[in-house]
Image (cartoon, grey):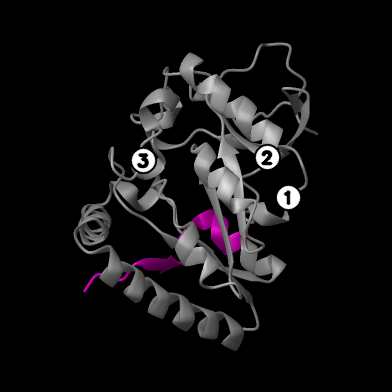
Amino acid sequence: MTELLSIDTNAKTIKGQKKGYMTAILYMTPNDAICPASKIAGCREACLVSAGRGVMTPVKKARDNRTAFYLKDKSAFYAQLKTECEKFIKKAERKGLIPCVRLNGTSDIDHTDFIASMPELQFYDYSKRIIIAEKAKELTNYHVTFSYSQTGRYQKHVEGALALGNNLAVVFRTKQLPKFFMGLPVINGDESDLRFKDESQVVGLYAKGKAKKDKSGLVVDLPDNAIAVG
């Protein structure tokens, strides 16, 4: 049986331990069924599934297995997920850390019913789906950062997310980030992954994996005269 949660295997989430948190992430293989907004957002080719350990064959296989499990038997999938979350809570507590879980590491599934069933656990995600951003507002234990893209058809979704008060995660071509984007202050989102602790702002991220060469509109190029953070 393939384990669903990966605990602090991400270089960025490990940084959260210094802030008192332990992070578990569910990684899957994105497709039309579990990433329905990826086409209009133009992020299909630049997906983070290609970043870091995601290029390794064993990692790819494990993500494929989780995705197949979810699509074949959602009831059994969520039953196993609940068991793993409960074990994760105990593991974090033994280490004196606060547990938090990101269920959409490389997917964009509406897990809000499951999240509502575990109010004692902090969940967070990046999402390109307004429906998830809307539902998250009704839950005290779920924080959603909306993922930005420049593609034309996707702009109404960005505007909707801003109207809801969501932060925006923006992927920039270089590690140099602007001080402001769309009139909002920018923070360095690569310093940690604890998005539920952010104030209202833009979360600047550096393009990784295939995103470094993306031309779809997902990755933002700064003008030469942009004023960098710091």
**Percent x, y for residue 142?**
60, 58
Q: Quadrant of residue 183?
A: top right
**Is residue 228 rendered to the left or right of residue 85?**
right
Tell me the residue that label 1 is attached to. Answer: 198
| Disc 1 element | loop
**Percent x, y for residue 46?**
39, 31
| Disc 3 element | loop
Q: For the residue marked with disc 1, what is the amino acid?
A: Asp
Number of other residues with Cα within 10 Å of mark 2, as a class: few under 14, some 14 to 19, many 20 or more: many
Tell me the residue that label 2 is attached to. Answer: 167
Q: Is residue 47 magenta?
A: no
Q: Is residue 12 magenta?
A: yes
Magenta residues (range): 1-15
Q: Residue at x 41, y 24 (%)?
A: 40
How far apart are the alpha carbons under marks 1 and 2?
8 Å
Return the residue nearer the eye: 130 or 101. 130
Of the image marks 1 and 3, the number of the one nearer the N terminus: 3
Number of other residues with Cα within 10 Å of mark 1, as a class: few under 14, some 14 to 19, many 20 or more: some
Q: For the residue marked with disc 2, what is the amino acid?
A: Asn
Above/below status of 220 relative to 7:
above
Tell me the residue that label 3 is attached to. Answer: 35
How far apart are the alpha carbons under marks 1 and 3?
25 Å
Return the residue nearer the eye: 19 or 110. 110
Above/below status of 107 relative to 45:
below
Looking at the rendered image, the disc whose residue lies closer to the viewer, 1 or 3, is 3
Q: For the residue marked with disc 3, what is the amino acid?
A: Cys
Q: Quadrant of residue 97?
A: bottom right
Q: Are marks 3 and 2 in contact (CB under 8 Å)?
A: no
**Percent x, y for residue 65?**
21, 59
Q: Are marks 1 and 2 in contact (CB under 8 Å)?
A: yes
